[in-house]
């Protein structure tokens, strides 16, 4: 586009998923995960935030305002993990992928499963265990073809 009124978007931070919220457009500090919680008192199921979710897959609730947005805790527990030894070209291996049970701030009963890498621990099963306490945080993974810093969420031992 070559117009006097057209402006080029400046490279910046780009979260890799919709549920990774970046309150500061210039820093990963303060980033957090957002979920959607069903408002039905008998359900209260939490899903990772997806702007297109329209009904609850657990209670089948379909009200126009079926969900409220919630902030997920930075703390969680490893539910399951795997040590990955083979990946896409350019991705260093081995690394640890896991599913982490993460709570909802202000709701002690609610949890949601978050898939993310576990960093800061040697990728060896003797260093990992189910139930291990972890803490999540945002980090820049790499630059994309447009010069943006791609931001991911990962967990490390607490």
Image (cartoon, rainbow, N blue to C red):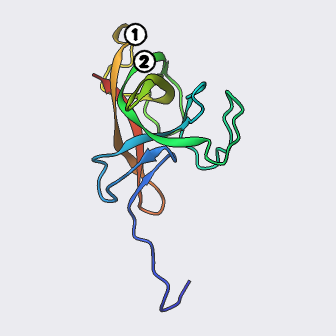
Can the viewer see residue 94?
no
Mark 1 and mark 2 residues within 8 Å of each other at the beta carbon? yes
Residue placed farthest to the top in the image?
126
Residue 115 x %, y %: 50, 29
Per the image, label 1 sits on a secondary structure element best described as loop
Give residue 155's quadrant in the image: top left
User: Image height check: is 65 above or below 87?
Assistant: below
Which sits earlier in the primary sequence, circle 1 or circle 2?
Answer: 2
Per the image, label 2 sits on a secondary structure element best described as strand
User: Image height check: is 16 above or below 6?
Assistant: above
Can the viewer see residue 56?
yes
Residue placed farthest to the bottom in the image?
4
Give residue 138's quadrant in the image: top left
Residue 111 x %, y %: 48, 24
Q: Residues within 10 Å of mark 2 (few under 14, many from 20)?
A: many
Query: Closer to the observer: label 1 or label 2?
Result: 2
Residue of label 1: 129
Residue of label 2: 78
């Amino acid at each position: 586009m070559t117009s006097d009124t057209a402006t080029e978007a400046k490279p910046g931070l780009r979260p890799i998923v919709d549920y990774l919220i970046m309150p500061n457009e210039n820093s990963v500090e303060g980033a957090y995960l957002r979920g959607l919680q069903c408002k039905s008192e008998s359900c209260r199921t939490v899903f990772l935030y997806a702007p297109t979710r329209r009904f609850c897959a657990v209670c089948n609730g379909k009200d126009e305002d079926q969900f409220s947005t919630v902030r997920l805790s930075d703390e969680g527990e490893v539910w399951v993990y795997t040590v990955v030894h083979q990946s896409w070209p350019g991705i260093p291996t081995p690394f640890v992928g896991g599913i982490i049970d993460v709570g909802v701030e202000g709701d002690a009963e609610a949890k949601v499963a978050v898939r993310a890498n576990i960093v800061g621990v040697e990728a060896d099963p003797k260093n990992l265990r189910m139930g291990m306490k972890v803490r999540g945080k945002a980090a820049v993974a790499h630059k994309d073809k447009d010069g943006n810093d791609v931001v991911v969420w990962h967990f490390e031992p607490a």
